[in-house]
């Protein structure tokens, strides 16, 4: 009888250990899709002003910075050099997209000819991408996405280069 109890206890202990190991090693549940911090940003595709394509899912492995701006928005125009500098300094680990929001009151391509930006620009003529990504009507607005596609920051208002860099560094953690 003692021997049966001994084997039963060992069997239960081993079964419990196996159960714990299985539970601990189960893959994490994917975050919900959305535009709030902690959610997986919905995939989208845009044609850039220079004719190239930008697709969010193609940027996996990099921090993605999406900036909503407009030619008529003074704070937007002031912060654009910060995004350009970020892309020039961290191109191997960061993707940046500057999206001109509604209303489009100027020829964005003509406007950009006066600058030597390296970052890709796109125009959201229909407002569909802004709506999909939860952009507000307050500009500028910036969304930071982790290399896994999860929103780590969603900010309105102009960002300094130091703040932008800190948000990107946080997204890499």
Image (spheres, rainbow, N blue to C red):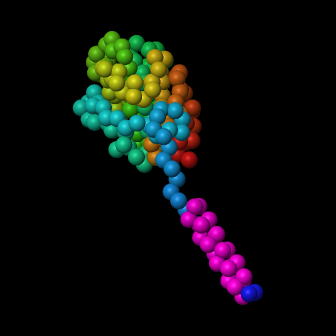
Q: Work out whether residue 121 or residue 10 is closer to the camera in this orientation and state it.
A: 10
Q: Residue at x 36, y 27 (%)?
A: 129
- Report the magenta residues as a range: 3-24
> On screen, 24 above or below 13?
above
**Residue 138 percent location from the top left of the image:** 49, 17
> On screen, 122 above or below 13?
above
Residue 84 appears in the rendering: no
> On screen, 139 above or below 89?
above
Residue 51 appears in the rendering: yes
Q: Residue at x 28, y 27 (%)?
A: 49
Return the residue found at the far left: 51
Q: How many marks?
A: 0
Q: Work out whether residue 22 or residue 173 is closer to the camera in this orientation and state it.
A: 22
User: In the drawing, does residue 17 fall left or right of residue 34?
Assistant: right
Q: Work out whether residue 11 or residue 45 is closer to the camera in this orientation and state it.
A: 11
Query: Is 164 part of what is drawn in magenta?
Result: no
> On screen, 47 above or below 140?
below
Which image quadrant for residue 87?
top left
User: In the drawing, does residue 25 fall left or right of residue 118?
Assistant: right
Which image quadrant for residue 11?
bottom right
The kind of secondary structure the magenta stretch mainly shows is: helix
Return the residue found at the far front: 1
**Residue 128 percent location from the top left of the image:** 34, 24
Return the residue found at the far right: 2
**Residue 19 percent location from the top left of the image:** 59, 66
User: In the drawing, does residue 135 fall left or right of residue 55?
Assistant: right
């Amino acid at each position: 009888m003692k021997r049966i109890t001994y084997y039963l206890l060992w069997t239960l202990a081993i079964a419990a250990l196996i159960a714990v190991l299985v539970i601990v090693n189960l893959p994490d549940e994917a975050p919900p899709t959305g535009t709030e911090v902690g959610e997986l940003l919905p995939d989208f595709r845009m044609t850039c002003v220079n004719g190239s394509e930008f697709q969010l899912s193609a940027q996996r492995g990099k921090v993605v910075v999406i900036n909503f701006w407009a030619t008529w928005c003074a704070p937007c125009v002031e912060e654009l050099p910060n995004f350009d500098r970020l892309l020039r300094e961290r191109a191997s680990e960061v993707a940046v997209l500057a999206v001109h929001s509604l209303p489009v009151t100027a020829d964005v391509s003509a406007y950009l000819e006066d600058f030597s930006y390296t970052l890709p620009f796109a125009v959201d003529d229909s407002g569909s991408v802004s709506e999909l990504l939860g952009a507000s009507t307050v500009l500028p607005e910036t969304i930071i996405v982790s290399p896994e596609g999860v929103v780590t920051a969603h900010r309105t208002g102009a960002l300094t280069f130091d703040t932008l860099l800190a948000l990107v560094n946080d997204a890499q953690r």
